[in-house]
Image: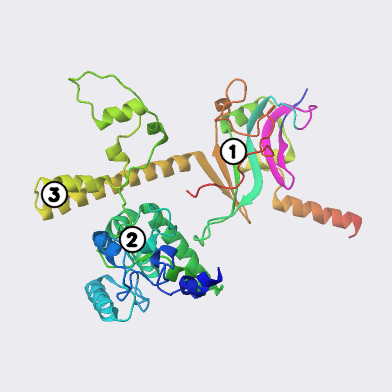
Amino acid sequence: MDSWIEGPGRAFKRPLPGSTNYLSAYDRFGRLIRLPDGKPKNKNSSQSGDVDQVKARQSEGGNPALVPDGLDQAAQENDRQDTTKKDSNALPPESLDDLRPFPLNNSFRSQPVLSEELREVIYDQVVNRDRSVREVSVEYNVSMERVGAVVRLKTIEKDWIEKGKPLAKPYARAILKMVPTTPYLGSRTTHESINDLPVHSATRQQIFYPTSESRAFTRVDAAHVFRSGLLPADKRIPHPQLVEREKLEIAQVPKSEVDEIMNEWVAAEAARKQAIEEREKAEEKRLVKTVRAPRWDFKFRDINVDESGKDGRGQKGVGWRYGFPHQDRKRGQVRIPTSVE
Amino acid sequence: MVVKIRLARFGKKHAPFYNIVVAHARTARNSKPLEVLGTYDPIPKSPPPNDPHARPWKDIKLDRSRAKYWLGVGAQPSDPAWRLLSMIGLLEPKYRPSMVGGKVEKRSLIYGT
């Protein structure tokens, strides 16, 4: 034990800033494998193809300020120059080996988190420039859920700063130094795959469905077999417009036309959503009557007593129901919210 | 027997929640009523923090046409039920602030407080 701490384990006594500090990043003599003067390079060079895909670590002296659109190119140039300049004394970017926290589990890799800079840019684009979550998601290759989460958390952060609440900045800095991060690289930013098909519970069953050979059995039919009313996979993906764009590009439609078609698609989608929203609002206005009182409003929602059914136990019925024991003290009841809508 | 429109308290300790019910006057408060007209949640909901003009509100669900029917056939609302029903114009308000003020003044004259 002592010999390990004095020997190869010495590197872990003081964590190396700007590195993940995982066991597998060091060889058995305690040397950082990816350092240029480190001897055992054979394994790494065989994987050098993958290395490019690994997100480059955000340089530590990186510009913390928000990077507006006009300065994108300049920022990228700077980034490149920085990395080439610093190469002599700074650490080279992590290889896939450096991102394995568990030495015996080859398939587990640390996934990068959004850098502070990128989060700031996402918040700015959505809140200040009024761009849709979908657009921002496509531009920076960040999933829509994550964009939403970034906007929510940044809103809270800015609120706290305004109110003068203390922030755990040193903690955040220390953590961000130890995990791989996705830097902001303008429109070249890539964080994750954004168009994965979410697994719908209806599609988790294995179905043997006999159909005639002459029939063209498409994804639409497959969706219908899983559950009637289920949308086909092409429509359940987060960004179906990207598939349309790809199709047009394969058909060699000129780029300007593709852009136009895509803009139309996005506008139509937005109009459809707005129509639904307006309809819901109108319905709400019809059903709910608000009465103003000095301290609060009373909102009267019109309901239908018949919805509780003949026995008064219908699911849609309103009110505390009679003859039902309460389940809330029962074992296994989840009383805290499990998801944020 | 008199049919009343009244509130039946459900909910938990410190978290009241009322069913607005039509029931015979002499039955127990939480017994099974003739009909559940709706609900009244007296705990005000706080408005979303990002909207400075939003006001807190209280949720009331009520089947207006059934309430109107029961009033038409002579159901007698209790005072709290009267207050709620008068808000949406089904009844004349029973206690106006001016009336209450007058009563208080009268009483203070009588009792000399």
Q: Residues within 10 Å of mark 3 (few under 14, many from 20)?
A: few
Residue A225 found in image quarter: top left
Provide the chain ID for the residue under circle 2: A
Quick one: which residue is furthest to the front in this view?
A3
Q: Residues within 10 Å of mark 2 (few under 14, many from 20)?
A: many
Amino acid at pointer 3: Glu
Does label 1 lie on the same chain as label 3? Answer: no
**Residue B86 rendering spot, x and y as whole percentages:** 64, 41
**Mark 2 or mark 3, which is nearer to you?**
2
Residue under pointer 3: A249
Residue under pointer 1: B61
Q: Which residue is drawn at 29% across and 67% down?
A: A41
Quadrant of the drawing holding the N terminus of chain A: bottom right
**Mark 3 or mark 1, which is nearer to you?**
3
Q: Residue at x 43, y 54 (%)?
A: A104
Q: What stretch is highlighted in magenta?
A: B6-29
Regarding mark 1 in the picture, which secondary structure is present there?
strand
Q: Which of marks 2 and 3 is nearer the N terminus?
A: 2
Disc number at residue A233? none
Q: Do the residues labelled 2 and 1 touch (CB within 8 Å)?
A: no
Residue under pointer 2: A96
Q: Is residue A252 visible?
A: yes
- Judge from the rendering whether residue A133 lies leftward or rightward of residue B73; answer left or right: left
- Who is closer to the viewer here, A280 or B96? A280
Amino acid at pointer 2: Leu
- Judge from the rendering whether residue A285 lies leftward or rightward of residue A143; answer left or right: right
Regarding mark 2 in the picture, which secondary structure is present there?
helix
Q: A28 above or below B16?
A: below
Provide the chain ID for the residue under circle 1: B
